[in-house]
Amino acid sequence: MTKKLYYESAYVREWETRITQKLEREDGIYLVLEETAFYPHGGGQPCDLGWIDKIPVLDVVLEEGAILHKVEFFPEKEEVGCHLDWDRRFDHMQHHSGQHLLSAMCLEAFQAETLSFHLGQDYATIDVARSGLSQAELMMLELEINDQIYLNRKVSNYFVSREQAAVLPLVKQPKVTDDIRIVEIEGIEYNACGGTHVSATGEIGMIKLLRAEKQKGHVRIYFKCGYRALKEFNIGMEILGSLSARFNTAKEEIPDRIAKWDLEQKQLQAELSAVKAENDVYLAEKLLADRQGRLIQHVFADKPLKDMQNLTAKLTEQADVIALFVSKTDHKVVLAQGERGPACGAFFKLHLADYGGKGGGSDKMAQAGFATAEDAMSFYHFTSESLMALEEE
């Protein structure tokens, strides 16, 4: 059986050992080592990565008591030197210990038991047995946890028997009955856990609770610890700095400045909509005056789809016409009819695929988008010719 160095110390980074088994499977090559500090997937914590004789370790899994190390190829020798990806390991230690503190504080403050823990690449989460958590409660919880970090409480781990575990104030009774591993945070909690942890809460650095959201009758708390939390803070400060420069205002005044800017944009949009409506009236009159027959068609350089739809609606309301528009920049085509004419949606459904278009609509109006301006123009010309042919019949 492999000796698990991560149980003796979570701080082992390099070691020499011997390969005891080589496995070649459909999904890759695996090694079993006499000793390993590579932690396998388990308990919500991802596996460690690193190198075995400079060969990258791709995955580490626990299978029927054996720890299997997935590698790119077999080493040339049996005696190998191993090296852990320490940044990844320490990140996991910070977050797993941070999760224990967070869970303990949720239990103490809200009597909310932790239901699950997940440590992802971007953030960590716990689900707790509580129906909701306000922003004020989240902030209070964050302060309580960071207070415990600053107290630098000792974190220790050890193995006990089933009888010894029975007299400890464990958060939850373990499923295993032999060699039960206890992680103890001094003065905070006793927890049966097989993960890797820091030796004192101060090494967690800090914890930042990002948000809390309802999740199937309970609450999911998103958080980051240590270097991830610091990176989150630095990104936030960089964004604030950019906004401060953009609006030429102090960071604390940014919300008010954005609110003012938002109001200005709404006013400008209202003015623009009014100008567009007025312009459409004049354009509709010109198109109606210049038309020959019932078909009105026009090629726009950059008119948005919504504006073309509004214009076709104005035209068909004023006269029994067929309106066909295309926008070269947006690669969009709109077709609308008044009281009589071909069903627009059915026509598009029948012919769009031939030009790589996607869209549809009703009998009165249809619209479609195309990958290129050339495809849009080809469909526009085809539709125009088809409509003129129908008019001549």
Image (tube, rainbow, N blue to C red):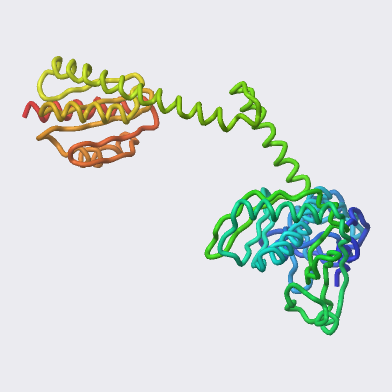
- Say whether residue 70 is visible: no
Q: Quadrant of the C terminus?
A: top left
Q: Which residue is most to the bottom?
A: 163
Residue 163 locus on image (x, y percent): 84, 84
Q: Is residue 269 above or below residue 44?
A: above
Snapshot quadrant of residue 365: top left
- Say whether residue 183 is visible: yes
User: Looking at the image, how many numbered discs can be counted on the residues?
Assistant: 0
Is 11 or 211 nearer to us in this picture? 211
Residue 304 locus on image (x, y percent): 35, 27
Q: Is residue 343 above or below residue 246?
A: below
Q: Is residue 299 above or below residue 162?
A: above
Q: Is residue 241 left or right of residue 92?
A: left
Q: Is residue 5 left or right of residue 289?
A: right
Residue 289 locus on image (x, y percent): 13, 15
Residue 90 locus on image (x, y percent): 82, 52
At 67% across and 28% down in the image, what residue appears? 241
Is 368 or 157 nearer to us in this picture? 157
Q: Quadrant of the N terminus?
A: bottom right
Q: Is residue 96 above or below residue 370?
A: below
At 63% across and 52% down in the image, what residue appears? 136
Is 208 or 391 nearer to us in this picture? 208
